[in-house]
Image (tube, rainbow, N blue to C red):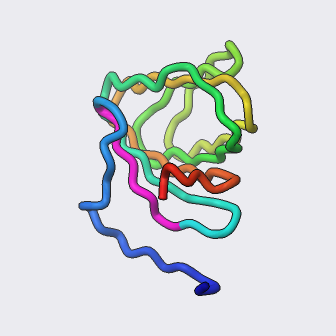
Amino acid sequence: MNPYMISKNHEGNYVEMAEGIRRRTLASGDNTVICEFSFKKGAVVPSHNHIFEQTGYLVSGRLLFTIEGDQHEVTPGDGWCIRANVEHAAFVPEDTVLVEVFSPVREDYL
């Protein structure tokens, strides 16, 4: 197994996850996977939880998180960490790009 991974920026690597939500996996290792997400204005991420810790950074746009019932507005330059098994949802009021790291590796994102 190669001890490192370099990923080149290729626009065509996006996966449509739901209406207005695209994802592309940038790189992965033994314990983490990093993904870029592109959201269209009005997109909704329904309330859910999972076994993955997710740490993110908002590149552009705006995101309205609901995390365990608390509302949070995220703007460019903001970061977050949502621990495993924490209920969360999001609404996207404008076109938005963000980057998130998941641990352990989300096999479904490879």
Tell me which corner region of the image, top left, top right, bottom left or bottom right, holds residue 42: top left
Prevailing SS of the magenta stretch:
strand
Percent coordinates x, y for residue 55 in the rendering = 65, 47
Percent coordinates x, y for residue 107 in the rendering = 55, 54
Left or right: 37 as drawn, with respect to 30: left
Of residues 20 and 78, the one nearer the viewer is 20
As drawn, 7 above or below 56: below
Q: Is residue 25 magenta?
A: yes
Q: Is residue 108 magenta?
A: no
Q: Residue at x 33, y 49 (%)?
A: 15
Q: Residue at x 56, y 49 (%)?
A: 100
Q: What residue occupies the far top of the structure in this picture?
A: 69
Q: What residue occupies the far bottom of the structure in this picture?
A: 2
Q: Residue at x 55, y 32 (%)?
A: 74
As drawn, 38 above or below 31: above
Percent coordinates x, y for residue 70 in the rendering = 68, 16
Task: Give the quarter of the figure containing the N terminus.
Answer: bottom right
Q: How many marks on residues?
A: 0
Left or right: 5 as drawn, with respect to 38: right
Q: Residue at x 70, y 62 (%)?
A: 31
The magenta region covers 20-27
